[in-house]
Amino acid sequence: MKKVYLAGPEVFLKDSIEIGAKKKELCDKYGFIGLYPLDNEIDMNGVSKETMGLEISRANEALILSADAVIANLTPFRGASADVGTVYEVGMAKGLRKVILGYTHDERKFLQRNIDELNRVCVSEGQYRDHNDMAIEDFNLVDNLMIDGGVTYPIIKREVSNVDEMYRSLAAFEECLVQLHRHYYPRGYVA
């Protein structure tokens, strides 16, 4: 069975273990093995916070290396863009030539999210600029152009009206699994 690394900010939720278990169950339903970051077993006894953080990073990278594909939750996290750790994982997977699928629960384009998030935005010479007079990217994409360009298929967008479901809804994640299944098994074959 193909292995899929499950990237996203869900690891920060109070019920992150349960969310990961549900995602892994869905992976199994579509013939994949889900690799969830919190599945890593790391001995953290007596280590500093810095060492702990670096060990978690190395363990997650090892999971990505062992995966055939990555499904990333690219819903904005603590700002206008996707979780920076998730974006790093997408970049690593891209460098390793893995199949990458992404989804977001915010249908706004990157420009609009930046306008909504930033305190001061102005238009200068026909271009949106932030409070530091730096251009705000406007390519009508879901996120930064390197994220949209880094995934194998277009990012799936499904608005979630309930903020509690922003990182818990699994509908768009399941759509990614359907797409990934078609990618690996175009004739309907399940491993």
Image (tube, grey):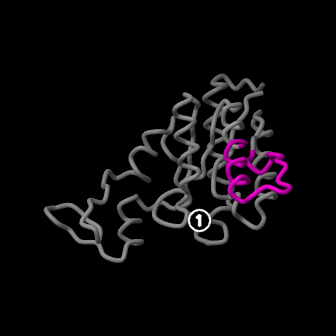
Identify the residue shown where x is 41% and y is 65%.
113
Identify the residue shown where x is 81% and y is 51%.
21
Q: Is residue 17 above or below residue 67?
A: below
Queried whether the magenta region covers residue 125, the answer comes back as: no
Q: Is residue 86 above or below residue 186?
A: below
Along the line of sight, which residue is nearer the eye, 17 or 62? 62
Residue 107 appears left or right of 67:
left
Residue 86 appears left or right of 5:
left
Along the line of sight, which residue is nearer the eye, 62 or 86? 62
Queried whether the magenta region covers residue 42, the answer comes back as: yes
Residue 31, image x, y percentages: 77, 33
Q: Which residue position holds label 1?
A: 160
Q: Residues within 10 Å of mark 1 (few under 14, many from 20)?
A: some
Identify the residue shown where x is 68% and y is 40%.
5
Residue 182, image x, y percentages: 63, 30
**How many numbered marks appear?**
1
Farthest left residue? Answer: 125
Identify the residue shown where x is 34% and y is 53%.
140
Residue 114 appears left or right of 93:
left
Residue 42, image x, y percentages: 82, 47
Residue 131, image x, y percentages: 29, 71
* Secondary structure category for the residue under label 1: loop
The span shown in magenta is 36-59
Looking at the rendering, in which quadrant would you find the N terminus? top right
Name the kind of residue labelled 1 in the image. Answer: Val
Along the line of sight, which residue is nearer the eye, 187 or 157? 157
Task: Please identify the quarter of the rendering in which residue 83 is found.
Answer: bottom right
Looking at the rendering, in which quadrant would you find the C terminus? top right
